[in-house]
């Protein structure tokens, strides 16, 4: 690759162009939120390109803004030197899985890339940062990919962790080695690196961990997600822990040899809802009621599309809480020790 002899030409003007682009996009988002919220995935790239092109008139970047499209990286280039990679999320957070560490589809001669992130959940908001400043970790699908975090603090990028600047890493013949060496140095006894085969498109952490090595907070967060994603946990089906066990390994890279115990250990107890006391409540429902606020938060933060995939039924953002309550209630009716509990009524009363 030929490196430009003039580092960052017109950088101040390009920063001004990006700032103006973000201001204009945020302004449009307030005026036409419904139409912009529908521009998921690469549908939003033409809008960004058009806004940049209009704002570039009279600047050094006039008539130089190009939408690359396809599988190329980045999505938009300016004067064949600067690049803008566009990412979107329909959730109310600033994280997503990013591009390949290997950058085999990088456009020739592009030297400085910026991340432009569109958060399409209400309130819709656009942000941008230098690309290398928002890459926190590496996860793997068919190849290692960066994890994007637009709220990442200075000094916490993956490049800070491996003590190798982004531009140095990307130009190495084998950039993966530096990353795997870093993760290997952090392994605890009994852990190994995780790699998913090419047929698996789901992302996972690089490090395989054992459940007992997790913090209390991590364990509870995962149990909360399990109770959202796998309502069959509230049934008496013999295979009710199977899907969760597979998800825990393939998506979270965590091995748990005693999944049943994490939900059922501790015996029965009582729960007070309003003025009524329910006795002999099975442990799994106690776990549900005691953590209901954070479970509902996890439910809200998970897209209806992902929930539909987990549940095997079609749900929507408007219906997903009621659909989840219905699934939990339906499964609970198969547990003989829970026949005295109206789970649907209890959940609706507690969620009010």
Image (cartoon, helix red, strand yellow):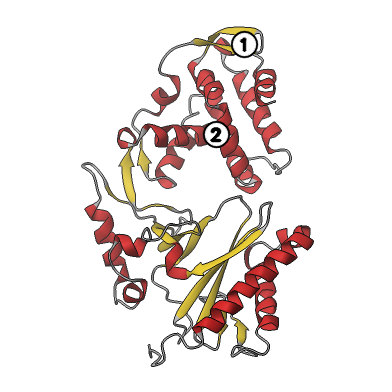
Whether residue 154 is visible, yes or no, is yes
Marker disc for residue 339 = 1
Residue beneath the point at 30% across and 76% down: 172
Q: Position of residue 75 (x, y in %)?
A: 57, 75
Q: Position of residue 196 (x, y in %)?
A: 39, 55
Residue 319 position by quadrant: top right
Q: Nearer the viewer, residue 225 or 292?
A: 292
Residue 337 position by quadrant: top right
Q: Nearer the viewer, residue 14 or 301?
A: 14
Q: First in sequence, mark 1 or 2: give its number.
A: 2
Say above or below: 245 vs 125. Answer: above
- Left or right placement of residue 88 versus residue 153 in this view: right
Whether residue 197 is visible, yes or no, is no
Quadrant position of the N terminus in the picture: bottom left
Residue beneath the point at 57% across and 27% down: 292
SS category of the residue bearing label 1: loop
Q: Residue furthest bottom?
A: 5
Callout 2 crowding tier (Cα within 10 Å): few <14, some 14–19, many ≥20: many
Residue beneath the point at 65% across and 32% down: 324
Marker disc for residue 230 = 2
Callout 1 crowding tier (Cα within 10 Å): few <14, some 14–19, many ≥20: few
Say above or below: 80 vs 134. Answer: below
């Amino acid at each position: 690759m030929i490196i430009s002899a003039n580092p960052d030409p017109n950088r101040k003007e390009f920063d001004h162009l990006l700032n103006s682009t973000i201001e204009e996009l945020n302004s449009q988002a307030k005026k036409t939120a419904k139409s912009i919220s529908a521009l998921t995935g690469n549908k939003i790239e033409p809008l960004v390109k058009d806004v940049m092109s209009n704002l570039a008139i009279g600047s050094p970047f006039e008539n130089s803004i190009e939408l690359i499209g396809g599988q190329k990286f980045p999505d938009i280039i300016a004067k064949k030197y600067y690049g803008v990679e566009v990412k979107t999320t329909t959730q109310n957070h600033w994280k997503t899985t990013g591009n390949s560490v290997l950058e085999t589809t990088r456009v020739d001669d592009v030297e400085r890339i910026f991340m432009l992130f569109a958060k399409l959940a209400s309130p819709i908001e656009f942000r941008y940062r230098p690309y290398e400043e928002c890459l926190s970790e590496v996860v793997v699908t068919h190849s290692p990919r960066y994890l994007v975090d637009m709220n990442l603090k200075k000094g916490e990028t993956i490049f800070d962790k491996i003590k190798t600047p982004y531009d140095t890493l990307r130009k190495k013949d084998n950039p993966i080695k530096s990353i795997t060496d870093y993760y290997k140095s952090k392994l605890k006894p009994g852990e190994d690196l995780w790699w998913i085969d090419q047929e698996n498109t789901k992302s996972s952490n690089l490090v395989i961990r054992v459940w007992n090595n997790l913090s209390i907070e991590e364990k509870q967060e995962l149990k909360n997600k399990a109770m959202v994603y796998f309502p069959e946990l509230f049934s008496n089906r013999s295979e009710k822990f199977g899907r969760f066990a597979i998800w825990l390994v393939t998506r979270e890279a965590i091995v748990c040899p005693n999944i049943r115990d994490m939900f059922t250990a501790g015996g029965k107890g009582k729960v007070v809802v309003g003025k009524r006391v329910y006795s002999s409540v099975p442990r799994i429902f106690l776990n549900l009621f005691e953590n209901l606020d954070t479970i509902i938060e996890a439910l809200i933060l998970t897209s209806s599309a992902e929930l539909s995939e987990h549940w095997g039924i079609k749900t929507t953002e408007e219906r997903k809480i009621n659909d989840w309550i219905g699934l939990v209630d339906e499964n609970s009716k198969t547990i003989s020790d829970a026949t005295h509990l109206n789970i649907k009524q209890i959940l609706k009363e507690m969620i009010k």
